Amino acid sequence: MLRNRKTILLISILFIILMGVYFYHDNQTGGNIMITSLSSDAHYAITTDDKDYAILWDLQKHTKKIISRDADAYSAYWIKSTPYYMWQNWKTKIIYVTDVNSGQDIKTFHPNFIVFGQAMSADLKYNVASDIDWNIWVGKDSVLKKMSRNYDDANGFYNKLINFTMVDNDKVLTSGLASGNADDSKDRTGVFLWDLNTSKPIHDYIGNIVQTFAVISPDGKYVVAGDMDVGNLFVWDLKTGKQKIYVAANQPVIGYTKDGIITDPHTIKPPTDYYRNYNIISVQYIDAEHYLVFNHQSHYTILYQTLNPKPLKYLDVGTDPWPATFNQERDQSMDTSPSAHILVMAKDQEPGIMVYHYDPKKQTLEKVWDGR
């Protein structure tokens, strides 16, 4: 009888320990890589990470829900202007498109590869994705075909994802490696605007060097891109491809000589603790006219107005915890809702996300939630 009680007690203790480990593990979701995508209304965010978790975050209720423990780390994407998010199961390679309101999968499809970044149009007609070799694929009604080939061996990417921004449902802006001079435009992987009906490029926005991140202004008029060279920042007219702004190392470029560029030194001074690494890893619009620039290894983000080449403010996002700006694959670890003025960021070495509210009148950022 006593032996039976000891056995029961031992089993109970082991059960408690195992449950504790289980719940601890669930509360430690997130790793060194986390892809973050925000709904347009900023009510929700979807993340995937290198611990194979797909997590749905409710930014209003400050809660999270684990969607899967078998998720491709690079597959999180919220389909803009819709209640739908998407992610991929790395074991089955199935991509799921889910309605956040009902929790039901409204669409599934099965590419023959693991995606390294993806997006879908709001009408669910077109989807685009990159594979591990940085080839770009486009799908119409979920049937994927190769649209663009990578450079030989994808030299210069170094873990950098290709970024996708949907335009008018039937176009996509891609960015990844610098604009090149390939004989065939399909061999380029710079900042391109593509027609998804024809799988042909509309514009090649030339100027950036090495890894590139580009976005489109909320009014659809401009393309803004930064790179990992010396912080080259460009603004182009989306329709004409004409360069409007050129900034290097946070200083407007005002002229050229045979020895190089001439910059305007009369700009605001950065904070004394600003780490002067000008490599840009991400650009994100925070309202209709202003965007944020995130530099490599920095806990400051720089506020710009679309057609003003001078930085307006250096905004501190804090160091407790550090934001995910240390690795180049982190260019998609942050996302914004320009209409709701919300910024969501992954953390550098801790699980979870950080949520900030931007005040357009005061031009300030305030952390409103540390999600764990």
Image (tube, rainbow, N blue to C red):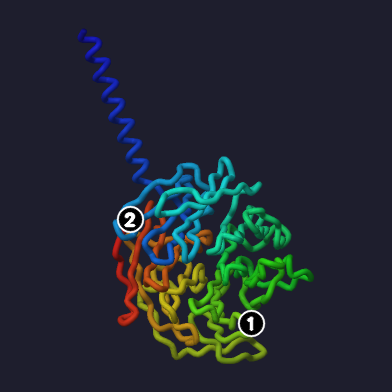
Where is residue 82? Give x, y as percent: 47, 62
Q: Residue at x 62, y 54 (%)?
A: 142
Q: Name which residue type carries label 1.
A: Gly
68 left or right, relative to 191:
left
> At numbered mark 1, what does the secondary structure look like: helix, strand or loop?
loop
Q: Where 252 falls versus 133 (above or below)?
A: below
Instruction: Give the camera-side residue of 315 and 372.
Output: 372
Q: Residue at x 38, y 65 (%)?
A: 42
158 left or right, relative to 186:
left
Instruction: Give the camera-side residue of 96 and 210.
Output: 96
Residue 334: quadrant of the picture: bottom left
- Image mark for residue 334: none
Residue 41: quadrant of the picture: bottom left
> At numbered mark 2, what does the secondary structure look like: helix, strand or loop?
strand
Where is residue 236? Give x, y as percent: 58, 82
Considering the image in quadrants, where does the N terminus appear? Answer: top left
Residue 228 appears in view: no
Mark 1 or mark 2: whose residue is earlier in sequence: 1
Circle 2 residue: 371
Where is residue 138? Give x, y as percent: 65, 60
196 left or right, relative to 36:
right
Cα–Cα span, label 1 and label 2: 40 Å
Q: Are marks 1 and 2 in contact (CB under 8 Å)?
A: no
Residue 173 appears in view: yes
Where is residue 78? Give x, y as percent: 48, 59
Dot 1: within a 10 Å radius of its alpha carbon, few (fewer than 14), some, or many (20 or more) residues?
Answer: some
Q: Residue furthest right?
A: 183
Instruction: Give the camera-side residue of 22 and 57.
Output: 57
Dot 2: within a 10 Å radius of its alpha carbon, few (fewer than 14), some, or many (20 or more) residues?
Answer: some
Q: Where 57 falls versus 279 (above or below)?
A: above
- Image mark for residue 241: 1
Q: Name which residue type carries label 2.
A: Gly
